[in-house]
Image (cartoon, rainbow, N blue to C red):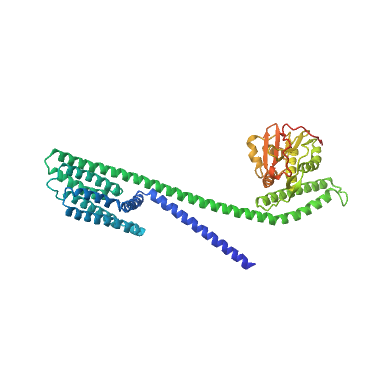
């Protein structure tokens, strides 16, 4: 036994250690995200890495598009430039481009700690500068003597296309953007300024303006990338917070389940420990108050014995109700279902409550629809439901009042039990409190009515186990009506010819007054 207990304790310690480890990991993750969001330097560094990743990813995705553009430019340039020069330039451009692609692939495959090193940005900047210079060589190649304005326009259009392409590829790293576009723009601008025609001056100015425009466009793209990365960081922060809250919620749920299990074990243990002496107290006090062994000369002693018996009975009822509710909540309450007539159960309960009702001069009116089919239910559970509701109705109905009990079919083919009293009613704001465990209304507290506040909780639990519905309607000064409904699925030999009658419009089939 001791070995088993030690093994169980070791398992619990291991589970607790795992939970603590998960909480530490979640807290570390949340703290890391908060630090990245809260510290400007850390945020900048993190975004630098993200921008480098976007730069490398864009280069890799454009691995085949850029050579295609270079091929088209080379094919058209044959009209004005020697094919040998074009071939040499095309080879150099392809080599510089694939050098950047290989560098980007190497960066993507590098470990995270190496990606943070500054030499990667230098490599990207140098590679883009070499790539830009290769395109600048295209504008320096000698043209044939018959090249006219068409060649000039082709040069300018090529410049705009290539600068726009490099802006899209290098926008996330501003240094790389300048390194890949400035060499081309400077070479084209200088070559245009060497000419004396106004059109060349105009194109030179437009080239400089285009460079400025694309640089501004690149900055805007950079801002958009930063905004996207900020949103992503905020999302990661939110996910970390939600995961932390979820872990805390799971831990709280586990603790609640453990506490509920401990409560159930405690109640199961204390059930025997409390009921055994209580039964002795009840038995001996009943013998004393009934003077079974002889008369008691002192009336105070007999009164004390009656008080002891009443208090013990109240305590035993409290223990029984707590145990019933605990058993239901733990899912250990089993229904022993059988076919039965709901009205027979209600009539039996009404007979049992006659004595208490007569003591307060309360009239019990029992109304039911004829020829109701049997229901599939637990007789003991239904009896407890009806007795609890009738007991509450009689308890809170003033002297000379009345309690009406109605049994009938519902509109969807089920059956209902309605119990309505002429008591003081319950304020609307107190109804949720009354329906809770140990909840009591202000009237019960003022009048010090005996009770534990568990009756309605047990009723609701038992009704839910029968897939039924529980409804309570009450207004201050107008009494209280409680309705329990069993679903159609529990009605045996259901007949559609049974006419539904609303509980408020039902005429009494017969009355029994107590």
Q: Is residue 506 above or below residue 248?
A: above
Q: How many numbered marks have been drawn onto this rendered protein structure?
A: 0
Left or right of residue 278: residue 441: left
Outermost residue to the right: 294
What is the x, y in percent for residue 391?
75, 41
Q: Please tell me in which quadrant of the rendered image residue 438 appears.
A: top right
Return the residue nearer the eye: 88 or 53: 88
- Looking at the rendered image, the quarter that the N terminus falls into is bottom right
Outermost residue to the bottom: 3
The residue lying at 76 percent from left, 40 percent from top is 372
Left or right of residue 192: residue 224: right
Return the residue nearer the eye: 48 or 42: 48
The residue lying at 73 percent from left, 54 percent from top is 274
* Residue 378 in view of the camera: yes
* Residue 452 in view of the camera: no
What is the x, y in percent for residue 100?
28, 55
Q: Is residue 316 above or below residue 396?
A: below
What is the x, y in percent for residue 227?
36, 45
- Looking at the rendered image, the quarter that the C terminus falls into is top right
Return the residue nearer the eye: 48 or 318: 48
The residue lying at 72 percent from left, 42 percent from top is 494
Return the residue nearer the eye: 224 or 158: 158
What is the x, y in percent for residue 333?
69, 52
């Amino acid at each position: 036994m001791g070995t088993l207990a030690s093994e169980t304790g070791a398992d619990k310690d291991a589970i607790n250690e795992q939970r603590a480890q998960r909480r530490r990991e979640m807290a570390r993750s949340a703290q890391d995200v908060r630090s990245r969001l809260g510290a400007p330097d850390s945020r900048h560094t993190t975004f630098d890495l993200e921008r480098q990743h976007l730069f490398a990813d864009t280069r890799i995705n454009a691995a085949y598009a850029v050579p295609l553009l270079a091929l088209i430019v080379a094919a058209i340039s044959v009209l004005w430039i020697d094919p040998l020069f074009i071939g040499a330039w095309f080879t150099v451009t392809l080599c510089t481009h694939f050098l950047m692609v290989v560098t980007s692939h190497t960066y993507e495959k590098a470990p995270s700690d190496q990606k943070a090193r500054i030499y990667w940005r230098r490599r990207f900047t140098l590679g883009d500068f070499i790539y830009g210079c290769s395109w600048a060589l295209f504008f320096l190649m000698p043209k044939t003597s018959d090249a006219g304005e068409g060649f000039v326009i082709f040069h300018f259009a090529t410049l705009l296309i290539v600068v726009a392409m490099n802006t899209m590829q290098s926008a996330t790293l501003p240094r790389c953007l300048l390194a890949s576009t400035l060499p081309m723009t400077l070479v084209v601008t200088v070559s245009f300024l060497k000419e004396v025609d106004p059109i060349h001056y105009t194109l030179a100015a437009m080239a400089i303006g285009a460079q400025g425009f694309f640089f501004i466009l690149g900055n805007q793209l950079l801002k958009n990338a930063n905004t996207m990365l900020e949103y992503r960081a905020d999302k990661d922060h939110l996910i970390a917070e939600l995961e932390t809250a979820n872990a805390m919620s799971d831990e709280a749920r586990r603790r609640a389940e453990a506490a509920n299990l401990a409560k159930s074990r405690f109640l199961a243990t204390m059930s025997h420990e409390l009921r055994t002496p209580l039964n002795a107290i009840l038995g001996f006090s009943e013998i004393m108050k009934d003077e079974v062994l002889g008369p008691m000369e002192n009336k105070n002693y007999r009164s004390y014995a009656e008080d002891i018996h009443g208090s013990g009975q109240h305590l035993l009822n409290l223990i029984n109700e707590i145990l019933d509710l605990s058993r239901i909540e733990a899912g250990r309450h089993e229904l022993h279902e059988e076919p039965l007539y709901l009205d027979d159960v209600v009539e039996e309960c009404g007979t049992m409550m006659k004595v208490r009702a007569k003591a307060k001069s309360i009239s019990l009116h029992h109304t039911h629809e004829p020829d109701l089919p049997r229901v599939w239910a637990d007789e003991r559970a239904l009896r407890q439901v009806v007795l609890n509701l009738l007991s509450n109705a009689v308890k809170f109905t003033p002297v000379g009042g009345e309690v009406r009990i109605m049994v009938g079919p519902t509109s969807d083919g089920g059956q209902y039990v309605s119990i309505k009293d002429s008591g003081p009613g319950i304020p609307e704001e107190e109804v949720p409190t009354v329906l809770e465990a140990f909840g009591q209304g202000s009237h019960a507290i003022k009048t010090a009515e005996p009770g534990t506040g568990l009756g309605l909780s047990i009723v609701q639990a038992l009704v839910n186990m029968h897939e039924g519905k529980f409804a309570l309607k009450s207004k201050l000064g107008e009494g209280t009506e409680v309705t329990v409904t069993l679903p159609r699925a529990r009605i045996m030999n259901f007949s559609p010819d049974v006419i539904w009658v609303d509980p408020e419009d039902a005429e009494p089939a017969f009355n029994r007054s107590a």
